[in-house]
Amino acid sequence: MLDVLIDVFRYESDMPGVLGIDGFLWWLEKERGYTIGFTRGHVSKDDLEGWDVFIIISASGEISFYDKEVDDIASWVEKGGVLFISRPVKNFESINRLLRVFGAEFLEEKAKSYAFFCGVPDRFLEVDPRFKMIRDFIGEHKVNENLKAVAEVPGKDPKIAPYFIRVSEDWTVLGAAMMGNRPGAVAAIRNYGNGIVFAVGLLYMFYRWAYWWHNRELEKDDRSSLSNVKFLTQLFDFFEEHCNNLDI
């Protein structure tokens, strides 16, 4: 089991009313059995001590990272910590100050599709040659084994789509979508020292996590192209395996 620290200090929902990440937090605590903690301000190495995973999700983008804070987070990851970052609500530069330490940054450009692909079913290759470009662009990793597409929201909303990430060669692309006439990364992972950094250009999937979890059985239908729950399940399975190996 993991001890997971959530950065609520920077959190801001981009959904109207009270919609937020409660369903995602419930899944982490009740379904995954993790211990959940919350930040109340800028973090230091002492705040990160003892936590396995640090999640910065749906950051407002209005609270900058102190230089020392960036150094402390990077040092914690290097020693074995797992850093999980979703795209910010706005002001991408704030979160990119941290991500650039690891050789990545969120781009303020979103896909024209409501979903991205972690794997491309064979039947899609016959529909459009661009799907082969996406398949060839995606790296091989435990997290994206036997996956299909991952969607932001149920149904197609042209205003809501995954955002792209620019990553260095140290990263493995887990998921991609077409970025003009070429594929672009939407989800990626890398080893950093003894730790792991994962970044994904999503927000709304976490806001609607209760929906995806409630309908998880639909993913098992061969006709389904989505694998949202399987994607996060395999991701956190990988995090658990990583942390267990550190303890050996």
Image (spheres, grey):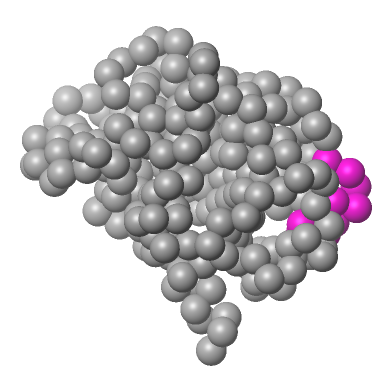
State the residue at coordinates (51%, 47%): 188
Quarter of the figure with residue 233: bottom left
Residue 101: image x %, image y %?
77, 50
Question: Is residue 236 on the magenta stretch?
Answer: no
* Residue sitting nearer the eye, 122 or 100: 100
Question: Is residue 67 on the magenta stretch?
Answer: yes
165 up-or-down from 128: above or below: below
Q: Residue furthest left?
A: 222
State the residue at coordinates (30%, 57%): 145
Q: Which residues are magenta?
A: 65-74
92 up-or-down from 135: above or below: above
Residue 29: image x %, image y %?
45, 55
From the viewer's perspective, tell me whether residue 60 is left or right of residue 122: right
Q: Residue furthest bottom?
A: 248
* Residue sitting nearer the eye, 164 or 3: 3
Residue 246: image x %, image y %?
57, 80
Residue 109 at least partly seen = yes
State the residue at coordinates (48%, 46%): 25
227 up-or-down from 190: above or below: above
From the viewer's perspective, tell me whether residue 93 is left or right of residue 212: right
Residue 165 at least partly seen = no
Residue 172: image x %, image y %?
50, 53
State the residue at coordinates (67%, 21%): 90
* Residue sitting nearer the eye, 15 or 233: 15
From the viewer's perspective, tell me whether residue 177 is left or right of residue 85: left
